[in-house]
Amino acid sequence: MKIAYDEMYAADGSVRANYQSYASWLKGVPDDVIVRKRKAAEIAFHQTGITFAVYGESSSKERLIPFDIVPRIIPAEEWVRMEAGLRQRVKALNAFLHDIYHGQEILKAGVIPAQQVLGNSQYCHAMRGVDVPEQIYAHIAGVDLVRAESSNGDAQYYVLEDNLRTPSGVSYMLENRKMMMRLFPDLFSRQKIAAVEHYPDLLLNSLRSVAPQSVTDPNVVVLTPGQYNSAYFEHAFLAQQMGIELVDGNDLFVKNDIVYMRTTKGPIRVDVIYRRIDDDFLDPKVFNKDSMLGVPGLFAAYCAGSVTLANAVGTGIADDKAIYVHVPDMIRFYCGEEPILSNVPTWELGKPKDLAYVLEHLSELVVKEVHGSGGYGMLVGPTSSKAEIEAFRSKIIASPAGYIAQPTLALSTCPTYVESGVAPRHIDLRPYVLSGKEITMVPGGLTRVALTAGSLVVNSSQGGGTKDTWVLEN
Amino acid sequence: MLSSTADHLYWMSRSMERAENTARMLDVTYRMSLLKHALIEPHHEWRAMLSISGLHEDFEARYDLPSGQNVLHFMALDEKNPGSIYNSIFNARENARAVRGKITSEMWEALNATWLTMHQTRIEGIEEDGVSKFFEWVKERSHLIRGIAHGTMLRDNTFRFIRLGMFLERADNTARILDVKYHILLPSPKDFGGAADYYQWGSVLRSVSAFESYRKVYRDQIAPKRVAELLMLNTDMARSLITCVNEVHRLLREIDGSRANLLLSRCSDLHSRLHGATIENIFSYGLHEYLSEFLEEIYELGKLINTTYFWSKDE
């Protein structure tokens, strides 16, 4: 594998233009100051309780996501292109979702095999013919981008996956910025860095813009599975930042297809629900019967158009890894444009030719479960043992269509503080794209970093950390 | 305000207040038991402690003798006893955790730190000479948390539900202490003004921090009827029944009456009954009967608060 593209240093060791100002500042800061600041950051994150829970880990119920003090810096012109690409992609994904739950033009045109959509377990038949405000389904999209070298030798951005269900992590983006400004205020006066702090305002505006039509002053709430959910901190944080109520299923009830919240002054109507509960658990009357988290009758109220759910029900079909390969075609079909952002080349193991190639090259490839997420259920060939590869091989052979494979990308690196000092570590980027009456976003997003040397898995559940992300302004 | 939020705030403060009152009662009982006074029958005081809390059945099922050591463990550290100080603090913290975003961060941090220390104490146990120190600690934490609420919170319904839980719990506790102690210490004419009164009734006063207040108000020796008057009808006493009911009455009217007609009228009745009472007619009616009815009323108010504001299950 080639040496990965480094965000800060060019191949000849010189500092890239976007890091010039930072590098000259860093030169003037004594090492012990950095040590002290790192310690201060850790203590502050602990005290404010910015923690997450890891599934399956009983020993330490709450853990901090490690925060790294070297920012990821994105040049202005790169962001302009990225933003255009994200808008285009999310627009197409929303158009796709509306289409497959209504006229299914894209299937009729033969652009995507109908079986791959309609026969997919993520396709929600209950959503057929249900109209949603502004025809928006993925109100909040977390699009994972990575930078890697393409076949012609340039480092370019690829979309790794589109998270259209309940993407999380935005609270870390906001807290990381707050922490950086607190630790290094002087850095922010040296150059123009695009602000991200207004994200909660954008989110609230976006959510209000998709309220049911008749509502003039919509009541928006955040619906959480509860305080033992791994992302509860974020749910509480966003509700507080937006100044709206954080509710769980027991706070809501449905009467005559209208959703109410129970308050000390009696029932108050709810118009928009930013829900952080998966589809399956939303309404025990329609989906998982055993769900204790949801609200009985919610789906009927939703179908009746009296309440908006963000994201909509049934978005999982569009971020399914089997559908991922078709997103560039979606963009051509719905927008009549060439995609600005590239997909990672992908083998679909349901295709015999692809399967044969992948089984030959398992040790070089990354293989992912089609319905998996969060770094679970995947094989990273180059860093796996023979036994792990063989175990995975039998899983693939048992149900090939359940997997896709991609080349192992040499994800770009960014200098990162580790035990032994500063070393390059692989990173990705998750911008948050908000769709309502219009598409909005704050520049940048959440940068995740794989803290283990050589590791390409950045997920927090797998030991990843985060960095503040700067988009420079000209 | 969300009903569940109000519910958590109310139980957060009720649980902390309960922890404090339990600590107060245990502390006084413990001090009394050290006196080894000729007038005190062994285990008598400890048994009284259990009947105050209404927990003697649970205790007898799992412990043999109501010895000091057993009752102390049961009431302070036993995680199977829902009324133990350990569980009260646990409940206060769990309720606070659910509404972290609604209380000030100082408030949350104080409650969380209290729980962490409590948890550690249960693991390490309490040494013989650390008993009073432990009760002091519980009282101090309760004072601290109440003070933080007072010093940092907006005077909105969040604050009012916290106060409501506190005063309702306090009314209940003061009435229980008085009822049980009176029952045990039935005054006999020959003891009037004797040493027994001084110690026994003095301990009742101390359990509600009223010993000095008694001296100030009456400037006289300790007499059972006056103790009862002070703890029931004195509007200047922080923990008297009438003070608690005054506060509950005021808070309920401030919180919002639009759905609360039944609750408000019930509370008003109790309020005017207390204000019209004298200690003489309470005694001629029967103190125990009067206090039992009072406790019943407090219980009913709690139930009505549940249905009015928290949408309890039966609605």
Image: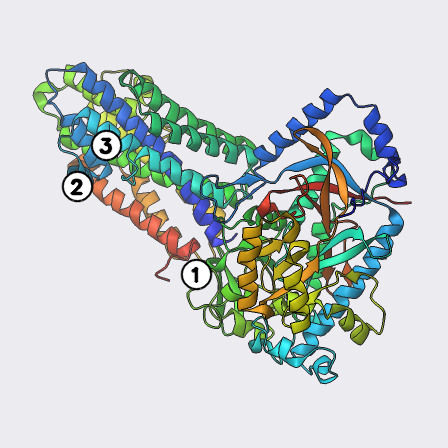
Give the residue pinned by disc 1. Answer: A292
Q: Tag 1: residue type? A: Met
Label 3, label 1: how far apart the Cα atoms are: 44 Å
Q: Which disc number belongs to residue B24? A: none
The answer to which image quadrant residue A224 occupies is: bottom right
| Dot 2 and dot 1 within a common chain | no
Q: Nearer the viewer, residue A219 or B238?
A: A219
Q: Which disc number belongs to residue B178? A: 3
Q: Position of residue A188 (x, y in %)?
A: 82, 35
Chain bearing tag 3 is B
Q: Position of residue A35 (x, y in %)?
A: 69, 24
Tell us which disc is closer to us: 3 or 2. Answer: 2
Chain bearing tag 2 is B
Q: Position of residue A415 (x, y in %)?
A: 76, 36
- Helix, strand or loop for disc 3: helix
Query: What residue lies at 30% left-to-right and 43% top-to-bottom?
Result: B273
- Helix, strand or loop for disc 2: helix
Tell us which disc is closer to us: 3 or 1. Answer: 1
Q: Nearer the viewer, residue B157 or A132?
A: A132
Query: What residue lies at 77% left-to-right and 65% top-to-bottom?
Result: A89
Label 3, label 2: how far apart the Cα atoms are: 21 Å
Give the residue pinned by disc 2. Answer: B57
Q: Tag 2: residue type? A: Glu
The answer to which image quadrant residue B18 occupies is: top left
